[in-house]
Amino acid sequence: MRVIIVGAGFGGIAAAIELRRHGFDDVTLLEAAPELGGTWHYNSYPGAACDVPSHFYSFSYAQRRDWPRLCSPQPEILDYLRGIATDFDVARRIVTDTEVTACEWDEVRCEWTVRARDGAGRLTARTADALVLATGQLNQPALPRIEGLDDFGGHSFHSARWTTTTTCAASGWR
């Protein structure tokens, strides 16, 4: 059985591990970002950390008992997830820079066609017998509806789209 998982954050990686544990080896994860991690990839602003005890970010079958802090920062959580993806042979199944644009079910062939755009803008199509959506929700910026926001001339950003150039000095903030 061919399985496509959309999203390579905690949910997508967990789904891939479970599928593999149950004998499904033809598993592909499609990830829009340049690397795995989902929320923990996108939310990389200074001071980003979990707001619950770190041990909740350990899978039951891959417990990490040596978290250095009660609420770990983003890099530590992302490193844990990278390690798990490698240890459970999921990392090589992730296709990054691939934004899924459509998923269509073919009733006659009983298969999914998943259309995507890669980082170079090329359109691709893959087929699968099963489709798992693990796109999460915390990496999608929810921008406020503020009158005049489109006309604002200053620097603005959402923490889920932080870049290394987003700094106080670069923005002229004091």
Image (cartoon, rainbow, N blue to C red):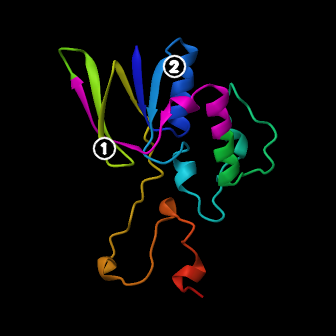
Residue 164, image quadrant: bottom right
Q: Farthest residue toward the left? A: 108
The C terminus is located in which quarter?
bottom right
Q: Which residue is mark 1?
A: 122
Q: What residue is rendered at 56% in x and 38% in y?
A: 10
Crowdedness of circle 1 by 10 Å Cα count: few (<14), some, many (20+)?
few
SS of the residue under disc 2: helix
74 lies above or below 98: below
Q: Which residue is mark 2?
A: 19
Residue 110 in picture, x, y percent from top left: 25, 15
Residue 1, image quadrant: top left
Q: Which residues are magenta?
A: 81-105
* Left or right: 96 in relation to 53: left
Q: Is residue 59 visible?
A: no
Q: Between residue 116 and residue 16, name the one nearer to us.
A: 116
**What's the residue type where badge 1 is placed?**
Arg
Q: Is residue 18 visible?
A: yes
Q: Between residue 51 and residue 64, name the one nearer to us.
A: 64
Q: Between residue 143 and residue 22, name the one nearer to us.
A: 22
Q: What residue is rendered at 59% in x and 82% in y?
A: 169
Residue 157 in picture, x, y percent from top left: 46, 70
Whether residue 92 appears in magenta in the rendering, the answer is yes
**What's the residue type where badge 2 is placed?**
Leu
Whether residue 168 appears in magenta in the rendering, the answer is no
144 lies above or below 97: below
Q: Earlier in the sequence, mark 1 or mark 2?
A: 2
* Left or right: 111 in relation to 165: left
